[in-house]
Image (cartoon, grey):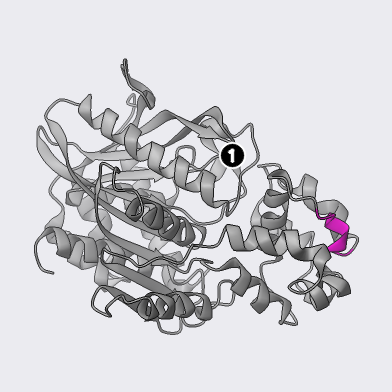
């Protein structure tokens, strides 16, 4: 963890102590829900008063001056709900969940900001479960600037934690996020004095950056989608999984081997028939399927694997992953779950750290070049390299820049 992030979390922890004393007795206040197609229930988890939001931004701005720009934009406190909603997976009904944060004002009309979170392996770290997560708290607080905030849990977490997480699976990710947006609409329709402007902003980082672009492409391809997509901020996402795989197999060492195991485990659960021991070497091949139990952190998963690529993958896979017939199903799965080629029609920004060794800059740069080659203007689609930042270091700067950009659009500055 870098020094600045640690100091920021310290500031936030101090604020959280004060915050807890402000919301005693408010947990699990249920909003009655009837007659909806998607929304099943909504429970008030906690409220964050405007005074706490003001103090948090002021304290954090000492280390992150860019956060000071939010100071004059905070208009209210926020109420934070867990919602449960209906979606589908593989044609079957599933209950999913997520967090919705709304301004605690009497009335108003607001756009929705849907934020898709990054890679997680622990049930306890899902947005609707981890109420003390600093990133989620900051995002929830942004409801005070005039947004309805939507934070999906994804399948495999929250209400759906009895199933595996379909990691980097295009179809189920798009379905889960867009069905939550429909549930948010029904939730707001049930609330007195607050309504939707129908405008939608999308943002996310890492897996969430990939998910954001997948959802953007699906929405832009669907003329019947009810929201008006205004802009999309995609950050450090593995948009092209074939490119990422090519990058990884060309390395001597890769610092996040559990990412690779997570992908393969997900695709095995989705029907991939390629034997795991033809891709991963022992002793790692036998470990992978039971590793993802929802209780084990990414750091602990990494400790069970190896960062040495020649030891992690079989020689046959390294030599023939993109040429040999035995690995064609793997290549097809990676290709099918990469972001399809499309021409964005709404403002789109790609943020990425120039020192990112988890999802290298080439993935974002390749996607940007693809958009421009397809006919997108450099005014509509932009890339923003975060100089000197690695994958972890880019999370907060990308999130802050995304929200400030959205606020500029909402306030007519762009």
Task: Give the left or right position of residue 52, taking residue 293 as reference.
Answer: left
Q: Residue at 40%, 50% (x, y): give it.
A: 136
Residue at the disc numbered 1? 156
Question: Whole-percent x and y of residue 68?
Answer: 21, 67
Which of the two residues, 226 or 72, is positioned nearer the viewer here?
Answer: 226
Secondary structure predominantly adopted by residues drawn in magenta: loop
Question: Whole-percent x and y of residue 293?
Answer: 71, 42
Q: Is residue 18 above or below residue 355?
A: above
Which of the two residues, 45 or 230, is positioned nearer the viewer here?
Answer: 230
**Residue lying furthest right in this view?**
282
Q: Quadrant of residue 119?
A: bottom right
Q: Residue at 75%, 64% (x, y): give it.
A: 328
**Residue 13 in sight from this viewpoint:** no
Q: What secondary structure is found at the residue carrying circle 1?
A: loop
Question: Whole-percent x and y of residue 306?
Answer: 79, 68
Which region is colored magenta? 274-281
């Amino acid at each position: 963890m870098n020094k600045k992030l640690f100091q920021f979390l310290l500031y936030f922890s101090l604020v959280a102590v004060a915050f807890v004393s402000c919301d005693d007795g408010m947990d699990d206040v249920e909003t009655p829900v009837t007659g909806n197609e998607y929304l099943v229930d909504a429970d008030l988890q906690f409220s964050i008063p405007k005074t706490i939001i003001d103090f948090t931004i002021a304290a954090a701005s000492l280390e992150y001056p860019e956060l000071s720009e939010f100071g004059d934009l905070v208009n209210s406190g926020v109420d934070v709900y867990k919602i449960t909603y209906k979606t589908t997976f593989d044609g079957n009904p599933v209950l999913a969940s997520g967090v919705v944060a709304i301004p605690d004002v009497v009335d108003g009309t607001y756009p929705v900001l849907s934020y898709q979170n990054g890679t997680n392996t622990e049930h306890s770290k899902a947005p609707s479960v981890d109420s003390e997560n600093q990133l989620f708290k900051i995002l929830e607080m942004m409801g005070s600037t005039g947004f309805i905030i939507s934070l999906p849990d994804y399948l495999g977490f929250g209400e759906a934690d009895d199933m595996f997480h379909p990691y980097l699976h295009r179809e189920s990710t798009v379905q889960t996020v867009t069905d939550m947006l429909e549930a948010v609409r029904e939730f707001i329709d049930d609330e007195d004095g607050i309504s939707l402007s129908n405008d939608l902003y999308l943002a996310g980082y890492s897996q969430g950056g990939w998910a954001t672009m997948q959802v953007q492409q699906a929405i832009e391809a669907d003329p019947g989608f009810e929201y008006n997509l205004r802009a999309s901020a995609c950050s450090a996402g593995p948009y092209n999984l074939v490119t990422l795989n090519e990058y990884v197999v060309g390395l001597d060492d890769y610092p996040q081997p559990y990412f690779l195991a997570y992908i393969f485990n997900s695709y095995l659960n989705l029907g991939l028939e390629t034997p795991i021991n033809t891709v991963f070497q022992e002793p790692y091949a036998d470990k992978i399927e039971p590793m993802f139990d929802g209780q084990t952190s990414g750091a602990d998963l990494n400790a069970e694997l190896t960062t040495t690529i020649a030891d992690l993958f079989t020689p046959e896979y390294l030599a023939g992953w993109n040429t040999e017939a035995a690995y064609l199903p793997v290549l097809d799965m990676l290709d099918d779950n990469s972001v399809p080629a499309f021409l964005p029609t709404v403002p789109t920004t790609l943020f990425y750290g120039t020192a990112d060794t988890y999802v290298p800059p080439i993935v974002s740069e390749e996607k940007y070049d693809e958009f421009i080659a397809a006919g997108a203007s450099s005014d509509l689609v932009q890339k923003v390299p975060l100089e000197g930042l690695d994958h972890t270091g880019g999370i907060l700067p990308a999130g802050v820049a995304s929200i400030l950009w959205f606020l500029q659009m909402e306030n007519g500055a762009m």
